[in-house]
Amino acid sequence: MKKPILVVLAAGMGSRYGGLKQMDPVGPGGEFIIDYSIYDAHRGGFDTVVFIIKHEIEDAFRETVGLRVSRYMEVRYAFQRLDDLPEGYAVPEGRVKPFGTAHAIYAARTAVDAPFAVINADDYYGPEAFREAYQFLSSTADEPGRYHYAMVGYHLANTVTEHGSVARGICVTDGAGMLQSVTEHTRIEVQDGVIRSTLDGGASWLTLPPDTLVSMNLWCFQPSFLTETAAGFPAFLDTTLAQNPLKGEYFLPSVVTRLLEEGKADVKMLESRDKWYGVTYQADRPTVVQALADKTAEGVYPAPLWG
């Protein structure tokens, strides 16, 4: 079995935050959030990282994140391009954004040749998640007729913000700790210390327990997932180009859901007790900066991070 690879989704722009969140310094030494994820992944066992980026940010990304990380890990790049589509398909007129996270993985199909974990560039996951992911990928392989994947879930209370709503995938597992479904809740808020979600624009609210497991888009896949993502892309495009050509997106969870429904895969639910940090809103930034300063002072991270 080849050694696991880390894949970082770094092509997205932070529309609500107002810029490239993954390029915003938040650490005591000017580090980005992505630096901490890569650092934690490396000490968790990962030696190779694939950055999925846009050509528009290539130079800045290589000169900052890429240059630092390349002293410690093998660095590969893949480019998410709007026109990178299966043969016979074309970009609809007026479309300006790529086709989602599964499209990003599709873009990395020639750069990933081993079991791999997938993370967002603008999320702080904490050390435990990467240890769990590496251990799973190092000890698990597909079997004939059955894919074995995993997801690292977080307690909902560790992923919310005081500065607005968040979208989270609510996970349902069976008694054996296997993922059964992920339901996207697009508006989760903390109100008077209670975490609530609305699915109807605020007409009604559902109270969610603080320890509800949610997806933060940290997945563990075998190379078979690349094949399945490519295989399902034309069907997605057929539907999207007819119904929502300018905004429809091909998401990783939708590929996973299809494989679960078809009985091709199972997904083990791993669990992290670390607190997630992210800059969903500009007002979140001081909290992230303080948290990373505290962790540095406590010795969780060195200063400067990369020596």
Image (cartoon, rainbow, N blue to C red):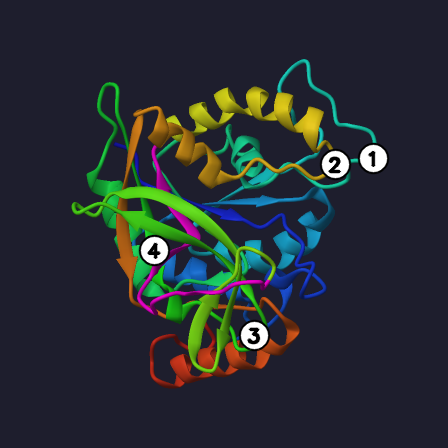
Q: Are marks 1 and 2 in contact (CB under 8 Å)?
A: yes
Q: Residue 153 carries which label?
A: 4
In the rendered view, does 215 fall on the left or right side of 27? left
Q: Is mark 4 on a helix, strand or loop?
A: strand
- At horizontal 53% and vertical 39% (from top left) the residue drawn is 251
In the rendered view, does 187 fall on the left or right side of 206? right
Residue 118 visible somewhere in the drawing? no
Name the kind of residue labelled 3 in the image. Answer: Val
**The stretch drawn in magenta includes residue 197:** no
Q: Is mark 3 on a helix, strand or loop?
A: loop
Where residue 141 sits, quadrant-wise, is: top left
Q: Residue 238 at what x, y percent from top left?
A: 63, 21
Mark 2, residue position: 246
Nearer the N terminus, badge 1 or badge 2? 1
**The stretch drawn in magenta includes residue 219:** yes
Nearer the N terminus, badge 4 or badge 1? 1
Q: Is mark 2 on a helix, strand or loop?
A: loop
Q: Do the residues labelled 4 and 3 touch (CB within 8 Å)?
A: no
Mark 3, residue position: 26
Q: Residue 94 carries which label?
A: 1
Name the kind of residue labelled 2 in the image. Answer: Leu
Q: Say above or below: 13 vs 204.
A: above
